[in-house]
Amino acid sequence: MPDCAFASIVIGGRVSADDFITLCHLIVCEGLSREEDGEEFSPELRSEGQPLRLFDHQAIGGRFGALEEWCEDRGLPFTRTCAGYPGGWRAERVVFTGRGPVEDYPADNDGNVVATSETVKAHEHISTLRAWFAAAEFKIPPLVITSEDVTSPRDISRASAGREESGGGGGEHRSQLQKGPAT
C-alpha cells in the first residue's frame, strides 16, 4: 500500500470554462472534498469570489501530482500543505504564486510554517527571515471562471473523469482512483 497522509490544497486564479471542466475532472480523480471529512467535490459547491479549498485524508505521498502540475502549467496559484509521514517525508507547505518556481517550506503537522536552524542561518537579517515567512503565507486569489458558458460540470463523476485527466500512468504518486494495494 502506498504511503498516504492528510493534505489540503487551495487553488485560485483565472480559468476558462473549458479549463474549469478539466480542473473539476482532476479534482474528482483525486477524490478530494471541499471540507475536511466532507463529501467528495462537486463543481456546484464552489464558492463564488473564493479560492477553491480541497482536502484529502489519504493523499498518496501527501501530494496531488497531476493536479499540481496542471495548475503550474496554466499559471494557477496554489498552496498545498501536508502532514509528514514517518520515514517518508516531512510535513510541508508548498507555494506556487502562478509564476516562477514552486517553493517548499518546512511545516508542522498543522500546516504552520516553521523555521529550522538552517533557515535561520540562511537569513542574516530578521527582515529577510520575515520576508521568507511572508512568502510562505502567500494569499491565494479567488478562483474565477472567465466565461459563464460552463458546459454542465455538475455531471462530472469519478467514473466519467477517467485516467486521462488524472495524469494516468504509474509511478509512486498514483491517482486517488488507484488507491489501495500497489501492484
Image (cartoon, helix red, strand yellow):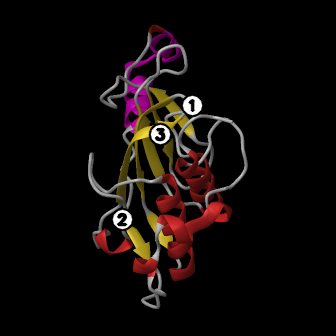
| Residue that badge 1 annotates | 2
Image point 50% across, 53% down: which residue? 30
Magenta stretch: give its range.
118-136
Comparing 2 with 25, the one in front is 2
Dot 1 falls on a residue whose secondary structure is loop
Using residue 69 as the reference point, say whether residue 5 is left or right of it: left
Question: Which tag is nearer the camera, tag 2 or tag 1?
Answer: 1
Quarter of the image with the N terminus is top right
Amino acid marked by disc 1: Pro
Amino acid marked by disc 3: Ala
Q: Residues at badges 1 and 3 in contact (C-beta under 8 Å)?
A: no
**Alpha carbon distance from label 2 to label 1:** 33 Å
Quadrant of the image occupied by residue 8 = top left
| Residue that badge 3 annotates | 59
Inspect this view and state whether residue 23 appears: no
**Alpha carbon distance from label 1 to label 3:** 10 Å
**Alpha carbon distance from label 3 to label 2:** 24 Å
Main SS of the magenta segment? helix
